[in-house]
């Protein structure tokens, strides 16, 4: 028993006997759940990476660039602007900041950002389509900075939106908020989907099934998948250090979609409006921290 550290007599504020140089209470007295072997094993079984503090800082930096990019384009989502002009702005800004636009050449995607108007659910390819008064426009930015990925999107309103546009954008924003509210250790991926689906359907809207949130950070798309529908208590348990997106795609009409001949553009089958909001989220010891934080108004 010679080497066993007797923790009984150490004061909480004393230096930790492990030699870390930190206070005992900030170190071995309360080891972070993200370093507990049982949690690391659980994540590994599900092929989920628990991010280290260094990796989290890298993703946070990439996240700041993504948010700066969304702020840069926001005032340009105006009537007459084309989706290609948004692409050029995102591309140039990303490169100027020493980063890489992740969509470019990703599985053959030809542009640097996804821009999805009205009935386009996601993966809109920038081109010569221009914005019209009353449109809703999702801009989805993913940047790779120092090898770390962050992914976020917002749906903007062009000019004077009608009642339908306002409704789907507000419902979708609230869906992301409802999903984030249940992100904490011990809750499950199913709790997130349930929270989002319940709210969307209570408002008479529908949840797209074919695209889901995803682990992110070291790669563009990692485990786990985060469906925006589901049963509470089902699926993988959330563990501190997990980083994933929640990115609900919510339709004003029915949930079904069609993929256009370009192989990417997903549109609502019934032609109804579709909105999306996405943030990159860290599961903390007590809840959630957004690494691409923007306000989701009530
Ligand atoms: N940013 C999208 C997501 O949220 C993925 C776009 S893939 C692309 O997961 F190739 F279309 F860019
Ligand atoms: Co994403
Ligand atoms: Co995205």
Image (cartoon, helix red, strand yellow):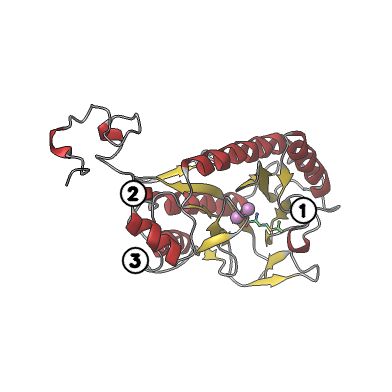
In which quadrant of the rendered image does the C terminus lie? top left
Is 231 rendered above or below residue 203? below
Q: Name the residue rendered at 59%, 66% in the picture.
A: 253
Task: Give residue 256's position: percent from left, percent from top.
Answer: 61, 72
Mark 1 residue element: loop
Q: Residues within 10 Å of mark 1 (few under 14, many from 20)?
A: some
Which one is in front in this view, the residue at disc 1 or the one at disc 2?
Answer: 2
Residue toward you, 202 or 62? 62
Which one is in front in this view, the residue at disc 3 or the one at disc 2?
Answer: 2
Marking on residue 33: 2
Q: Earlier in the sequence, mark 3 or mark 2?
A: 2
Whole-number angstrom distance, CA of label 1 to CA of label 3: 37 Å
Marking on residue 233: 3
Whole-number angstrom distance, CA of label 1 to CA of label 2: 37 Å
Q: Residues within 10 Å of mark 3 (few under 14, many from 20)?
A: some
Task: Give residue 143's position: percent from left, percent from top.
Answer: 67, 45
For the residues labelled 1 and 2, say whether their Cβ atoms are less than 8 Å apart.
Answer: no
Q: Earlier in the sequence, mark 1 or mark 2?
A: 2
Mark 1 — residue?
Answer: 104
Q: Name the residue rendered at 17%, 38% in the picture.
A: 7
């Amino acid at each position: 028993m010679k080497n066993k550290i007797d923790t009984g007599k150490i004061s909480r504020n004393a230096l930790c006997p492990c030699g870390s140089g930190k206070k005992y209470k900030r170190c071995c007295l309360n080891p972070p759940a993200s370093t507990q072997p049982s949690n690391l094993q659980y994540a590994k079984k599900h092929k989920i990476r628990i991010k280290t503090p260094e990796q989290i800082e890298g993703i946070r930096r990439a996240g700041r660039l993504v948010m700066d990019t969304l702020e840069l384009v926001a005032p340009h989502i105006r009537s007459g602007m084309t989706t290609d002009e948004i692409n050029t702005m995102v591309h140039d800004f990303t490169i100027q900041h020493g980063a890489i636009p992740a969509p470019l050449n990703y599985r053959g995607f030809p542009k640097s950002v996804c821009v999805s108007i009205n009935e386009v659910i996601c993966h809109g390819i920038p081109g010569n389509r221009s914005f019209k008064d009353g449109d809703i426009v999702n801009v989805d930015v993913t940047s790779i900075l120092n090898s770390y990925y962050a992914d976020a999107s917002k749906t903007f309103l062009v000019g004077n939106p009608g009642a339908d546009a306002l409704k789907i954008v507000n419902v979708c924003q609230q869906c992301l908020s409802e999903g984030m509210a249940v992100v904490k250790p011990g809750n499950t991926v199913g709790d997130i989907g349930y929270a989002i689906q319940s709210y969307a359907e209570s408002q008479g809207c529908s949840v797209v099934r074919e695209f889901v949130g995803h682990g992110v950070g070291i790669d563009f798309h990692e485990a786990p998948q985060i469906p925006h529908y589901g049963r509470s208590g089902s699926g993988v348990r959330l563990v501190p250090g997990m980083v994933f997106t929640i990115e609900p795609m919510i339709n004003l009409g029915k949930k079904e979609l069609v993929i256009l001949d370009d192989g990417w553009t997903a549109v609502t089958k019934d032609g109804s409006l579709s909105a999306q909001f996405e943030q990159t989220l860290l599961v903390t010891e007590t809840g959630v921290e957004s690494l691409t934080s923007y306000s989701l108004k009530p």
